[in-house]
Image: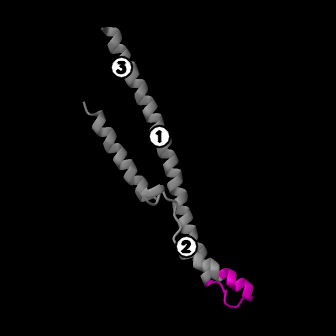
Amino acid sequence: MCNTIATYIIIKGLLGIVTGFFTMAFMGTMSIVCFWSEFLSSSNKLVGSAVYDSDWLGTLSNRREDLSMVICTINRPVAVTAGCFGKVERREFMTLCKTWYRFVQVFNEP
């Protein structure tokens, strides 16, 4: 009887450690992806405003065409998406963290 209880406690502890490790690895990866997604979006906006504020109308015609294409391309929003789930941003990352915390709290109650 004591062996089974001790084995159960050891297995439960090991599963907790493994689950915690994979959770931290997943959350760390997601935070990096969300950071770079927001960085990409803000950089896209900055490039568009920099090109528009430059003197692109006074340049050569072939350069003007290239810059107008850049301006047209920049008007579409750039975002990293997670398939059909939507954009990957800090807001979604925080929602994921809150949901995961609630999930863990439900299963840790005695």
Name the amino acid type tagged 1.
Met
In the image, 34: left or right of 69? left
Label 1's element?
helix
Residue ID at (44%, 29%): 17
Residue ID at (43%, 33%): 19
| Residue behind mark 3 | 9
| Residue behind mark 2 | 45
Residue ID at (49%, 49%): 30
Residue 78 % position (x, y): 53, 67
Give residue 42's mark. none
| Label 3 Cα crowd, 10 Å radius (few <14 / some 14-19 / many 20+) | few
Find out whether residue 66 is within the magenta segment: yes
Whether 88 is drawn above or below 47: the answer is above
Sooner in the amino-acid sequence: mark 3 or mark 1: 3
Quarter containing the C terminus: top left
Are the residues flagged by discs 3 and 1 in contact, CB closer than 8 Å?
A: no
Identity of the residue furthest to the bottom in this view: 58
Q: Start and end of the magenta stretch? A: 53-67
